[in-house]
Every structure is written in structure tokens, then in C-alpha cells.
Amino acid sequence: MGLAIGIDLGTSTSAAAVYRRGKVESLPIEGKKIMPSVISCKPDGTTLIGHSAKSRLYIDPLNTISSSKRHMGDEGKTYTVSGRSMTPVDAAKEILSKIKAEAEKYLGESVNDAVITIPAYFTSEQREATKKAGELAGFRVLRLLSEPTAAAIAYGLDKEKDQTIMVYDLGGGTFDISILKVEHNHFDVVAVDGDSLLGGDDFDNKIVQYILRQVSVSQSLQGSQEGSISMQRLKEAVEEAKKELSVSDVADITIPDIFNTHIDEELTIDKFNQMVEPLLKKTTDKMKEVLQAAGLTKRDISRVILVGGSTRMRAVREAVTKEIKQPFIADNVDEIVAHGAAIMAANLSAPEKDMAPVPIEVQEAVPHSFGVGMFLNDVWSVKHLISRNDKLPAMGSTLGLTRYPYQTEVDLPVYRQESIVPDEESFLGKLTISVRAQKEPVALSSIFELDENGILVLSSSELPDYSPIIRQYADTGEVNIPLLRDMIDSKQIQVKSVKIDTTK
Amino acid sequence: MTKEEVMQAFEQTQNSFKQKEQEIASWKNQVNLLEQKMDGIVNAFQAMYDGLDLPADLDEETENQLQNRKDGIRLSVKSASRLERKWKDIQWPEDFAENFVTPEELVNEIKANKEQHSDKPKNSEQAETSTEQKQDEINTEPAAEVEKEETSEQKNQAGLAETERKSDIELVQEKAEINEKVLDGLTDFTNSLQKQFYSFFEKAVVPVIDGLYSGKKFSAEWISQLQEQNNEENERVIEWLDVYDRFIQEMTEFLETFNFHLYEPEEGALFDEETMEPIGVVENHEMEDEQVAEIVRFGLLSKQRDKEEPLLIRPAQVIVVKNREEQQEDTGEEQPNESGQ
């Protein structure tokens, strides 16, 4: 069996790592540890992936695809590049194929197995699409692993006693916050939240705007080509200054001949902190919200770990310390997710358990609530059978009655939404079941089963009148699932199932 | 692993260690040289700036413009003066040799291990004599020690001998693994040092040239205007503006000391996504699509030992020709394939 690798398939950048000889190492892709998740197709038919593709983003945006991860699982999304049609799955496949080829070149052997990370909030169709992309790239996808879980594994938190971990992930363009419970090497994502429009770039932009105000650069100059070149220089200088402020109390931004002037500004850590305070508050507010969603307080959090290049900012560490507690931060926060995936990959591919780096089990949370459409108190509503943050695999059940005498069919529509008011945009599919026509209402059961890969199966069956399960439900409001299973297994009732076409 | 493979692995660590020692010694020289040269460039820049008097008797507008040029150069001098602050001190791995197991140490370990397991003191003495005789044969010594045990054991001691022999090979393997870990640590160190070195030149040194280059480009436009008005005052101004070349030359020599070279593609060259970063597009019907219209910023190359092709540290920033009509004909699309579209 060849080596199994871990892949962080990111929105802006991707990374890969391998666990061998007792340690994790990042796999260089074209000599660099991070590869832009960009694909570009040239008119001559050449497909470029990574840094060279990113270079073409500016001059040939129409034939270049970036941030396609945001559209994973959306079957309606198609890119047309140099006359070639590509779906987000095709784009991910190209990125993964590039990683596979580079990994094989570096390791000197074929690489067939991989663990690919995904955001904890990915829906079932997004998970399926990612897995499909991995398979099309020639990988056996050992597991799709949530990014916060991968980070926690990389931080070695599986080796410690049972604990509750908060993962604070601030990347270039997105912010994610997750809470995991670790018990006996068993990972359980209990809550996730975030802001897809907040990242390190917003922090840089605060400084850029401050400098532009200091040197009074007009809007017209900013918009000109010369202004655009100057802006590029300023952004690079600002990024360096931000890095310097992570280790120093003061940073200088000194740029001659820019915007028809010279910039010579000293930026103190206090001034920087003051500028970015509103952005940090957005992240700390999300921390509070996710704690509330998990039914926890900050005292319940054993560890906070930081992920993503933007967490190198001292202001982030200070804000997290103030809000929860002193966080853990690794040197390689950009590659930490890939490292965790690599450990998991080695764990899953080890021929013997003793050879695995750490025995890990992962349980993940349901990212969104799922419900069935039915009349509740005569109002057409969504009854949630699986709730957001339930553990995967998840299951839920309810009973209902036909609405009219001599009704012969019942439609059971499935929705993925938090609200109980049905939203047609959240409709995923339906099961239509025939029922015996009788004057009295006919009882039916509905069962939702959602597996680790996010595949939802809806099963329903007509129930015999006066079945004990109906009485129990009337008394307790709970479906006796073991009894229902017995009835199915003993063929007392006949079940009709549907695998929901979640790609709609 | 067979005994031969184990011995070979151990010996390989010795060769690799020597290479690593040389590599670290070379890095120490490089870093010492950098620290000296940094001091030199800071002093040279300051001296050049201090001697940078404006020509006398200029009209007010020209004097203001030239003073503005001098202010820009002052910032480049200021950036250069901060180079020492931006270079992080290196924590050299001082105790790595202590953890590394040499062939002599391995022989002693094997001997000690044998003495510990053997109930025959006479054999131990023989082994000691044998080791002393072979102390100059660095790489073959441990192999000989293991070999000697294999051939000298008597049949009626087979059980014990087997245990000892296995233990010795295991010992060699254990020491080879220790050495590999030391080597891994040293590789991590040199990789990180190389990264710091490249990053320092890319993010701290070359931006000083970028500032001077921008000033030079700005001045070039001014010079062409001045040349049109042929008079003596302008000649003095043009001569003064040569100062950019002197500063750039000084910094370029500093780069070359460390095998770094500026990469400046030619205007009109075809855009190369491997070595160039586009930061603008222009229409220019005199040129073909994807020809380089302007170099905005130099790239940076590092010439590597034993390699013909230099390593690209930073791509050159360029403005590329993109003529609108052809763009529309080619694609028929209006929106880029970026997020949110």
C-alpha cells in the first residue's frame, strides 16, 4: 500500500501533507507549501493550475476559475473556459490531480489514498461533490474530514484527556468558528458558525484606508492605472507591516514615489488594534453565538486553537484570550489543516492499528436542520426531524395522519432549513406514498436517516390502526424507533424509501 | 532489514552528517558575510545621501521638484538602514553533534552492550582489543564488531549468541534512527534558514530597489521633458538624477554577493505566467495580445549551486497588452469566473 496523504482543498489556496517516519511534513507543490486554488485554460488548450493559473487571473479572467469551492455541489454552476465547459467538481478535480502528481513526484511513489478536508458546514451535496472530485482525480477518498477536526488532530489534542475545543479559523477571506468535543480519541463537532465575508484581507484593508487618508489620495487617482499599481505596492507594504506588528510594537510603512507622493508612516500596535477592533468584535460575537448554540459557556472550553494565516496577528490572540482563554498557536497555521488530514490519512490507511499515528474516530455535526412538510395545527409547516448540530449519522422520526377521508396518497416533502415556515428554495425532494382509502385517518411514519457523507434517506410506511406505536406517540410525543424497526424487520409494515436528490 | 542494510543505513547517516556539517558551516559564512555587507550597504547609502547636495542656483520650481526627489531617496536610505533590524538573529543548533552517534561511539555501545549480556569476561577483553586495533577504520568499525560476534560464537552458546547478535543489530538500527532524527532536525533548520534568507531578500532588500526604481522611472519622464529644453541648468539637474543609478548599482552588487539577480523581462516579450505577475492590462494596437507593455517591478532570481536554472524568488510585475476587440471575439462572455459570479 502506498502512502496516503491529507489535502486541505481550500477556497483560495490548497495544501497537502503526508505522515511518514513518525512526523508530518508538508508536500511542496511547485516548490511551495501553498498552492492557489485557481485553474486557467489557455486558448492553445493548455490547462494551468496553481501559481501560473493565478498569474493569468488578471489578464485572462474569462478563462480562469478561482474560488470554485464556493460553488461546490451546485449542479447549475458551469464555467466556460477557452470553449471548454467545467463544473465546480471538474475544477476541484483539476486541483486535486495537480496535488496528486506533485505529491507523487516528491514522494517518488504512487499516491492513491487521500483524506480531503471540507468546512464543517458543508451540505450533503457539497460533500458528495468533493468526494466525486477526489475520485475523478484518481484518489480513493478515505474520508472527508471537517477542517476544525483536522486542525485539532494536528495540534495533537487527540492525545490529551477528554476536552471541549474551540477552533478559531481566520483565513484570508473567511472566518469559521467551531466547537469540538474530544472523548477517548473520538472527535465530535458540536457546533459551527462563521462569516464567509470576513478574513485577513479586511484587516489589511483597514490599514490601507488609513494610509490613504493620511496621504490624501483622491478617488480619481486611486481609480487610475497608476493608482492601481500604487495600490498594489501599498497592499504589499501593508501586509508586511501587519506581519511585523505580530512581533513588534511598531511598524513603518515607507514607500517613495507612490500615488505621486511619498509615504512614510509609523504604525503602532495600539493604532492598529484600534483600527481592527470592529472586525475582531465580529469574530468574538460569533464565538459567543456558537457557544450559545452548543449550550456551553466559556468555562466549558478546555482549549482554543488558532488556524489560518491571519491568526498570527497579536490582536487576534489578545481578543481570544480576553474572550475565552489563551489560545494555542502553531508555527504553520497555514498548513495545519492539511497536517491533520495527513495524520488521519495515515491512521485510516495503516495496515495495523499499532502502526497508525493515533487511533482517531470522528463524529461530525449536521450543518443544517432537515424537516418534513406537514400540517401542524392546520398550518402548513416544516417539522424538523434532524436538527442542526445533531451528531452524524443522524436519525429522526415522526408520525402523521392523512388529512382527508378516503385519501389515497400522501406527499412527504423534505426541506433543509432552520425555520418552520416552508421555503420552496429549501425544498430538496419528496416521497409520495400510497395509503389505504378509508374514512378514518390513516397513520404514517416518516424516518430521516443522514449518514456521515450527508446522504439523506427518507422512509415512510403506513401504520396499522390501533398500533401501539401510535398510542405511545400520542402519550410521549416520541416515536418508539426500536419498535418501528421491529415492525419493519418482521414485515408487519411495508416501507417505501427515497434517497433524496439533494443536488436540486 | 538485513544486517547489511542496517549497517549501510548507519553509514549513510555518517555521510549525510558530514554534508550537513559542511552545509551549516557554509550558512554560517553566508550569514556572517550578510551581517558585514548589511553594515556596509547601510553606511554606503548614508554616505551617498549625505553627499547629495542639490545643484546651486536653481529656479524655485526645479529646486522643489529636485527636493522632492531627494525626499524619496531619503526614504530608500531609511529603508536600507532598517535592514539589520529586519534580519532575525539565527539560533544556531549548537548541540546537534552531541546527539549524533559516531562510529566510535557505536563501537563502544556495542561493546558495553555485549559486556552487559555476556558472562564471559575474557571475550569482552578480546573485543576491546579488537576495537582498539580498528579505531582508525571509521565506517567499517561497527560492521566488523558485529561481524566478529557472529563468527566467534560457539554452537553450544547459540541461544545466547542469537540474543546478543540480534541485540547488536537492533542497537545499530536504533542508533541509525537517532542519527536520522538529528539529520531531520538539521534539515528542518537549514530549510528554515534558507526560507528566512530568501524572504529577507525578497521582502526587505529588494523593496529598497523597488522604491529607487519608481523614483528613477518618475525621473526618466522628467528628464525627457528637460532634454527638450536644452539649457545648462537642466544639464545639471539631469546629471544629479543619475544618483538613482548609483544607489541601484550599490544595492545590485549587494544582491549579487549572495547570488541574487534582478530579473527584468524585456518590454515586448510575451507574457510568461511562470515568471511574471500581471498587475495591469492596457490596450495597445501596435502590440500583440499578451505582450509585455511595461515592467512595473523587477523580479528576483537566486542562482543555485549545481543548478543551471536559477530559482525564481519573486516574479516580475508587468503590464500586459490586452486588446478589447479580440477579447470579446475570443470568449463572448462578460463575467470573470471568480467567486460570487
Image: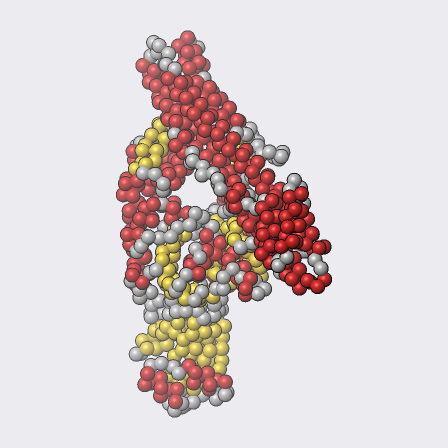
Location of residue A140 by image quarter: bottom right
Q: Looking at the image, which is closer to me, A97 or B58?
A: A97
On screen, residue A278 versus residue A234, left or right, reads left
The residue located at (37%, 26%) in the rendering is: B78
Q: Position of residue B253 (x, y in %)?
A: 51, 24
Q: Where is residue B190? Give x, y as percent.
A: 52, 40
Q: Is residue B279 visible?
A: no
Residue located at (50% from left, 87% from top): A491
Residues A86 and B14: in front is B14
Q: In the rendered image, which quarter is residue B291 located in?
A: top right
What residue sits 34% from the left and 74% below the top? A380
Q: Is residue A224 left or right of residue B28?
A: left
Q: Quadrant of the N terminus of chain B?
A: bottom right
Q: Quadrant of residue A444?
A: bottom left
> In the picture shown, does residue B254 fall above or below A282?
above
Please determine whether, in this image, residue A223 is positioned above or below residue A329. Answer: above
Residue A298 % position (x, y): 29, 60
Residue that protrudes farthest toward the front in the picture:
B122
**Residue beneath the point at 34% across and 38% down:** A248
The answer to whether residue A370 is above or below residue A330 is below
Residue B260, can we see it?
yes
Residue A371 in picture, x, y percent from top left? 39, 72
